[in-house]
Amino acid sequence: MTLHPGSGDPHQFGTEGFYASIGRAFVAMCAVVPVLFLIEGLDQWLGAGFDGAAGIIPQRIDGLDGVFFSPFLHHGFDHLYSNSIPLILLGTFVLAAGARRFLWSTLVIVLVSGLGVWFTGSPNTIVVGASGVIFGYLGILLTRGIFERSWWNFAVFLLVGLLYGGQLVGVLPTDERISWQGHLFGLLGGIVAAIIFRRRRPDLGGPYRSESPMTMP
């Protein structure tokens, strides 16, 4: 898609295109969370034990598949409730920059966070939850704000920091019930993803090509 700087530029803060991409991303993220509630509801209703079957069990081969499945699982509805709002909020701003970047970045975060937990976590634990992905999205917004000079991304990072400052301490080993490894490696995964999939600054002297947010190639 060819874009010209102006009201339709979805990457330029304050333009119609920017607000449109934010709106579409918000709707998409709001559709993701009910799926997580459905999975948790089925787990509890059926007594299926999804956590034990598909969670990350560190340093055990039979727990390695949890790297991919654990972000969809939670230790009860309270755990899921605490993750829902930051997941929607952060996911919206990450997704608004483009669906392709969002999907690839999320994959990197899931791999880095999950493998980090698998290699460094306690083998006597089962780790589930979307917290690693949430911290990964934080890392993306922070890094985009610096490397892409996207100050609105940085502003969102600061806002979330003010709202959930207590949870950010989760990157430190302060509570044995919380997988600080997942949080820390998720944050690192987000930083890596933001650098790998960063948007090159366009030449403002002419038209430029950019991914259209919320579209797939």
Image (cartoon, grey):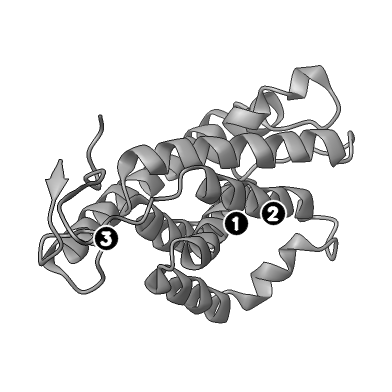
In front of the other: label 1 or label 3? 3
Which amino acid does the dot numbered 1 rest on?
A: Phe
Nearest to the observer: residue 11 or residue 164:
11
Sequence-first tag of 2 and 1: 1
Residue at label 3? 11
Residue at the image position 16 percent from the left and 70 percent from the top: 15
Total count of labels: 3
Which one is in front in this view, the residue at disc 3 or the one at disc 2? 3
Q: Earlier in the sequence, mark 3 or mark 2?
A: 3
In this rendering, is residue 192 above or below 151?
A: above
Q: Is residue 111 left or right of residue 182?
A: left
Local crowd size for mark 1, using a 10 Å CA cut-off: few (<14), some (14–19), many (≥20)? many
**Residue 168: image location, x then y, percent:** 67, 69
Q: Tell me the element at label 3.
A: loop
Which element is circle 1 on? helix
Q: Position of residue 127 (x, y in %)?
A: 73, 40
Q: For marks 3 and 2, give the CA distance.
A: 28 Å
Residue situated in front as seen by the camera: 177 or 19: 19
Callout 2 secondary element: helix
Task: Give the residue drawn at x 52%, y 35%.
Answer: 107
Label 2 close to label 1 by CB (< 8 Å): yes
Residue that badge 2 annotates: 183
Camera sees residue 76: no
Question: Which quarter of the image is occupied by the C terminus?
Answer: top left
In the rendered structure, the answer to whether residue 191 lies left or right of residue 153 reads right
Amino acid found under the numbered disc labelled 3? His
Q: Is residue 64 or residue 110 the one in the foreground?
A: 110
